[in-house]
Each structure stands twice: as C-alpha cells, then as structure tokens.
Amino acid sequence: MTRISVKVDGTTYEDEVEPRLLLIHYLRDRLGLTGTPIGCDTSNCGACTVDLDGETAKSCSVLAVQCDGSVVTTVQGLAQDGEWHPLQKAFHERHALQCGYCTPGMIMAARDLLGENPEPSADDVRHALEGNLCRCTGYQNIVRAVLAAADAEAASSAGASASSGREVAP
Amino acid sequence: MTEHITESEVGRSRPRKEDARLVTGQTNWTDNIGATGLLHLAILRSPMAHARIERVDVSAALEQPGVVAAFTGRDLAEGTGSLPCAWPVTEDIVLPDHPAVAVDEVRYAGDPVAVVVARDRYAAADALEAIEVDYTPLPPVLDLEDALTDNSPLVHEEHGTNRSYVWPMATGEDYGTVKGRADVVLTRRYVQQRLIPNAMEPRAVVVTPLDASGEYTVYSATQVPHVLRVMLSMVTGVPEHKLRVVAPDVGGGFGSKLQVYGEEVVALVVARRLGRPVKWTESRSEGHLATHHGRGQIQDIEIAATREGRLLGLKVDLLADMGAYLMLVTPGIPILGAFMYPAIYKMDAYEFRCTGVFTTRTPTDAYRGAGRPEATYAIERIMDELAVELGLDPVELRRRNWIGHEEFPYTSIAGLTYDSGNYEAATDKALALFGYDELRAEQAKRNESGDSVRLGIGVSIYTEMCGLAPSRVLRDLRYAAGGWEAAGIRMLPTGKVEVVTGTSPHGQGHETCWSQIAADVLGVPFEDIEVVHGDTRSAPQGMDTYGSRSLVVGGAAVHHAAEKVVGKARKVAAHLLEAAEQDLEFTHGVFSVKGSPEARRTIQEVAFETFSSHDLPDGMEPTINAEYLLDPENFSYPHGTHLCAVEVDTETGRTSIRSYVCVDDVGRVVNPMIVEGQVHGGLAQGIAQALYEEAVYDDEGNLVSGSLADYLVPSAPDLPEFTTGRTETPATSNPLGVKGVGEAGTIASTPAVVNAIVDALRPLGVRDVAMPCSPGRVWEALQSARTGEEAPSS
C-alpha cells in the first residue's frame, strides 16, 4: 500500500492505495465519484477522461499512485456555485448527448480544446475529440455544442471585460 | 394559480429533461450501484472456440485472498434452466440447451467456464488466474456453407446438424413462372459482416437480496427490465413476485441489451446462494466476446425485370449465422428481414428462404435495425446493379417501381400493409438538397478526365417495418410474447402528474417526449410531469424498448391513457359545475361550460377534488388516474431517401464521404431535435458498417477484433456532416400519426455508401466491394478489376 494525497474537484483526499489501483477505480470505488464512467480497457473510448494537473488524461490509463500531489478535475467539479459550465449548457441545448455515457469524457476533452484553442473550427473540434467515442449522436451535435460553447465563452469574456457580466446557467 | 400550456408541446424541440443528471455526472449507471457487503463476480471464459471441458478445478482460486466463493458450470447448473430463446421460428427448429456457464463443452471463444466471487474486483480478477481447466480441443465451425455439409464438425453434436432451421416464404405468383417472362435476371451474393454493437456503457448487473424474505432486486444495464423479470423467474425459479428488476440509467443498447444474459442469471443465482449482494461489470474486451453480435449473413439475391425496368420478381436465399446458441430472439432477426426485401417496390412474385446455421462464434441477435438493414442493403444494392444493366439512372429505376403515394394503404408482396407514405415527395426533396444533377455532371467530367480520385453517387430509398408489434402477428411468427405497451397517468393532488411507461429508455429521451405528449392532452405544463420507467415495482407492466417501438406503441399508449384521464376528469368537472358533460369544453387544461366561460375548473382542481372525494358524482370510483395498454393494429413504416457522394482515391483505396443527404418521413414528429439526433446516430452506425466495422475471426475461431483498439467504431473525424430533411406523411395506425425513427438511419445508410463507392469505381471495372469498404478492400477490388479477376467477397 502507498499513501497518496490527491485534490479532486476541490477536495483533498489522503488514502492508502494498492500500487496497481487505476485512477478511475480510485475515483469511482474509493471516493464515490461515479460521474466519470468506464467505457473500455484499452484507452480508446475516452469516457473516463479527466483533467489531471491541467492536461486531459484517460483515467483508466493512470495509476492512482501517479497522482500523488496532483489536482484532478472531473465532470462533477465543473459547475460553479450551481451554475453549469458553458459546455454543459451547450451540450444540453444542442442535444449533444443521447445515452450520455460518453458525455463526461467528451465535455472534459472539449474543455481542454477550448482552453488551448478558444475559437476552433468544426474540423478542429472533430480532431480534438478523436480519442472520445460516442455511439449515439454521430458527433454532429457534439461539434455544434462545442462551437456554441466557444461562442458563449467568447461573448462572456467580451461581456466580462465590458461590464463584468456573467453567464447565467439554466 | 396553476399554469396551463397554451401552445402545442408536440412538435417543439424541447431540450431534454434527462440531460441535467447526464451532463453533471449525477448519473445512476448500474456499475455505480453499491451495497453494504457487496461482492464482485468475475467470469473465466473459454480461450478456445470449441473444446470439451475435461476438468474444471476452482479449489486454488478459493484459497486466494478475498475470494468468497467459486463455481463451475456444473455447480451452477443445479436448479438453473437453459438461457431462453423466445422466438423458435419453426416447429422443428433445433434449439440447443444453453447453460449460463458451460458444463461439458465450450462452443465459442468467450463461453463462460467458471465464476469467482470476491470482495473487490481486483481480487476477483486475480483469482481467475488460479482456476485450472483441462480442455480437449474440438474443430471450430466457422464457414456457413461448409457447416451445412455432411462431413462438417458439429457445434452441437447431439443434434446431428448445424442447421437450426429453414424458414421459407413464397408470395404472389410462382417465382419460376415470373422469371420465365423476364428480360433481365440478375443474381448477386452479398455478405453482411458480423458487427459488435458496442453500446458505450458496458453491461453490468447488481443483485441485492432483501433480508430473509427471498426477495431480490436485480439492477441491470438492460433495455428490457420487464422481459428480464419474467425470464429470470423462469430460468432461476425465483418466483416472479419476489423479483424486482430495475434498469437504472442505461448507456445505450442498440439491441445488445435486448437480451437475457447468462451473467444476469449467474448474478441472481450467486446472490441467492450466498445471501449477499453481488455485482458483475463487463470490461469492453470481455463484451466483444460475451455480448451478442449482429448481422452475419450471406445473401443470395436474384431479381427479374422487364427491359423497360419493371420488376417482376425477387428471390432471396439467406444463410444466417446464429453463432453457438440461440439467444432471446436470435432466430427471428433474419425473419424480420424477410418482409423487407420487397421494400418500396411493386412486383408479382417473391420467394424467400432463410437457413439458420450454428457456428462456433459468439451468438448473434438484435443489432440496430435487426434484419431490415440486411434486407435493405441487398435490395438497394441489386437495384443499382439492375439500373446499370438496363442503362437507367438508379433513381429513375426506383421511380418506375415504387408504390405511388396515391396507392396507400398498399399491401406489399410480402403481405405487409403499408399505411402511408410518399416516396415521391421525400425523393424530390432529397435530390434538390443534394444537388443530384450537378453532382452527376461533375462525375461525368471527372471520369472523362481520368481523375485518380473518383466521385461516386449512392442512392438508397427505403421503408422499414418497426413499432413491434401487433400481438397476433407475433403469434403467427411464433414469437413467444405480445407486442403491446402500457402507460399509466397518475394525477397527483397538487396538480403534478406522473406518467408511468412500460418502455425502458437508454438514450432515446422518453422522459422528455412522453411529457410532451401528456402535456398536450392534459393541458398541464411540461415541467409538471415526471415520467416513471425502468423499474418493475413502479412501472409494473411493459414490453420495453427495441425495434423502434417506444413512441409508436408506448408513446401512443400515453396519449390514450391521458385521454382516459380527461374523460374521467370531465365527469367530475361536469358535476362540480352542475353542467352536462357534453356542454363542457376542455382547452389547455381547463374545463368550461360552453357559453359561460367564467364557469370553469382546471384539471388540477379536478385532481384535488378527486383526491378529497368530498363531492364526486354518485357511484364514481374516486380517481381520475388511468391506465392504457395498447396493442398496435399495424407496424409502423417510416421511409426516406438517402443520397451519398463519396470521393474514392484509386491510388490509396481511401473513401471519404463528401456529402450525405437524407430526407426521412417518420410521420408526425414529437420533438424535432431528438428525431434529428436519432437520424444522425443511425447514419453513423450504418456508415460504420459500410466503411469501418467488422468482427474478425481467425481460422481457429479466435476473435481478432477483440477490443476497441482492433474494432473500428468511428470517431468524430471519421464521419461527415449530415444534411437531414423531413417530409411528414402521418401514420394512420396510431392517434399521434407518428412512425419509428430509431433504426431508420442505420437501415438506409449502408447501401447508400456502398452504392456510391461502387458507382465511383464502376468505370474502372469494379462490380462490388465487400464490406467494410476499407482502403485495403477497395484497393483489392481495383486490382482484381484490372486483372479481370473477381475480388474476394469477404
């Protein structure tokens, strides 16, 4: 057993873990953070994508012990003061999910894209989400949602600089 | 003051009620469910396609830390029945015994051999390594034609044959006679490769025993909690009234969760034996072996026509890969296709025969479209070939043979009565959106210039039968259950409404759409309605979700139930307003007396008055709640025209979709945004069959495409932007005028893509490309055309 300290969605956890414990199982089985699901065992599907120290990571391919001292953000940590993240809002409004199983990973991967490229093209979005599989939507509405969220964030930051206005969640 | 809706909910693109929990991670997937003392199951699976089990020894596994129990197939067989097949399509079908865990023989790679129960999933997985199994290998059975020869090894030795059944049908005139007067007869062989459904949520099941009462709750990632309850009771002997089955949030199904799986049976049996809650969660790679596959057919199709391009007859001979066992509806899947080969066309004779064949591969069963994509592929591929043979434009050939809009209702040669449709309207709209003539002109120019990147145009005009199904038709097809659906409306005292449905959504948006339907009839706000589903305790009756049935049967049942509520409420309102029932108007949730609009009662007020029951009409049962079970009078027949333009690089064999246009007619639409989403997803899966996906087995029967690293589920850059349009020809077989939409895109798109690829390469001598049309396959087809040899068909 190894002792780790990890900050997940704003809360610091200290735990003894087996060295082989995957981050995704640590999140789900030990911390009860079941908002991040498991879709495969070969890191192809991206359903388990989280933010690990500012980079996206497939949490099925990271050991919990590797995260000692790290900061993890999951889909459950995106809403602030009950207000949804612009991507959460856009996915809802643009019908970018059906069964919703891929959605946490999609949103985390899209968030990473928008962090690096706030004004992506549709093609940029498709390529950025290449590592995240969706079986329901055919991706078209996911692309629309990410572009809409990019627009909303741009409008919001323009508004913020002018009047410090804030996005209002549904 | 209660609110009332003043505009129609049906027809609005309401963002979904389901989304809040899904976008924030507040979901309730089966694998999220815990329980005090929960134990984890792991399953040891056969590494061989076919072998006799000489010995299974779990004793070393029992010594592993954290292991609570371990079972062999023989241990579990005691008191447990065969996994069920509910669709024995013929009287003399060969229906082998199917133990949840193999006892004497394994018949596909992945067949369960032993079960370990441990305190966590890691310990359970470790313990599998300690189980000893001695196998004597037996020869695999992999080729559908060889399997039917006399000297073939047998999947089920005791039955003496690999032939499960032969299902024939002949309608109209004698096919041979009709063929005799044809100017043109074409025969083709098409191969429907095996597909792996790959719902994003892997399967999972949790069983919790309730104290010592002998009651169990089964949580399962299933499409069919109600069917599962009946079947689990029959297989395990746990009385049905002691079983509660819950489908929590379910992450997609596409038919793969329309099943009664061995793991569900094992989890219940183990929980009962140990008196402890147990969980089993599939890994993706395990799922590729253990969750049923789809398709897997060889189609020999022959079409007879006049020189002018009028169809005379059609003959189809199928070999359908059952896999190793017949599961819930395995044998019936190709039979659903039997009715769809004649499709949108008029003809004089139709002959069909399907032979179900056992192989040593994972069992097949329903996968999105279930029989109809296969049928649509074969007819739409051969129609293109016939158009070439006759020198006609492929759209023109279809026009000459389709059922005219003025001819509906029309009874097809296969005996289905298509209630409504307008193929002309959908096709005209699609051609315009697509720019068909311009693309044909560009194609001619590029062919002439010898462009190494060829442009191809594919047409697919389909109809399909969905909305399963009239119970009497199911009886005639020897399906064991009925095809009704249940709905209930509970009018709560505070004016809120619960809609109880027997459908079991797993991504379709029933909570949203059923709310829209009920809101319109009851006149209560969308937000005031809660849809209850997926739990046999709170939604006790249902036939669940598959076959594009939920809206046309279940949604229509909600409409009927709501009308019953209004009928009962009208009696109460009339009594309270001291008016005759026929003098009451009901608009937007308000009963008012004709001519004196100030005399009014809202339906919410009536709900409260009924709750208090202080002043109800004499003799009235004190409730305005209602239930309705709808047995549909007909199937649902959506249709549409799909057009695909591809660019095929003849140097690399790579195909890219340049544009994809479809115009679907799914009747009246409840929520256009959801319908569009269903079409997109359906297209993606149909295109995936055309271009990317195949369950590949090696010569020994090992699944080579055993993970998502080897099985190409398309990602975002692999798919084009779709252009979708609609025409609306209301169905006449249900009060909403709706038709199914869940499978339409999958059914239509595969032939559109392959027709486009072949159209691109035909000037180079290519007549067919086997699916999936990977760059390698396309390149091979081009090479064979150059050297004058036939390309391998698979």
Image (spheres, coloured by chain):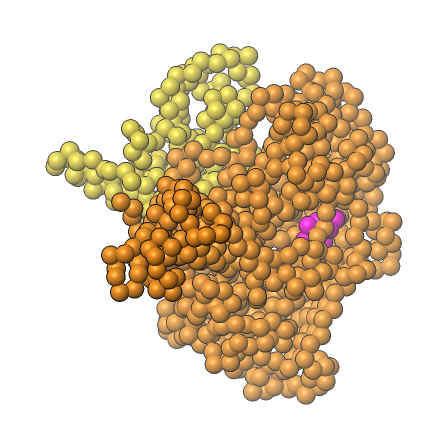
Chain colours: A yellow, B orange
Residue extending furthest toward the front: B618
- Residue A51: x %, y % from top left: 39, 29
Residue A105 position (above or below residue B610):
above
- Residue B335: x %, y % from top left: 67, 63
The answer to whether residue B438 is magenta is: no
Nearer-the-camera pick, B42 or B204: B204
Residue B754 position (above or below residue B437):
above
Residue extending furthest toward the left: A162
Residue B466 position (above or below residue B225):
below
**Residue found 58% across the figure and 79% down from its top:** B346
**Residue found 59% across the figure and 87% down from its top:** B307
**Residue found 66% across the figure and 35% down from its top:** B242
Q: Can residue B57 be seen at all in this image of the molecule?
A: yes
**Residue found 54% across the figure and 30% down from its top:** B33
Q: Can residue B205 be seen at all in this image of the molecule?
A: no
Where does the magenta region start and end?
B319-329
Nearer-the-camera pick, A18 or B411: B411
Q: Is residue B750 left or right of residue A11?
A: right
Q: Quadrant of residue B41?
A: top right
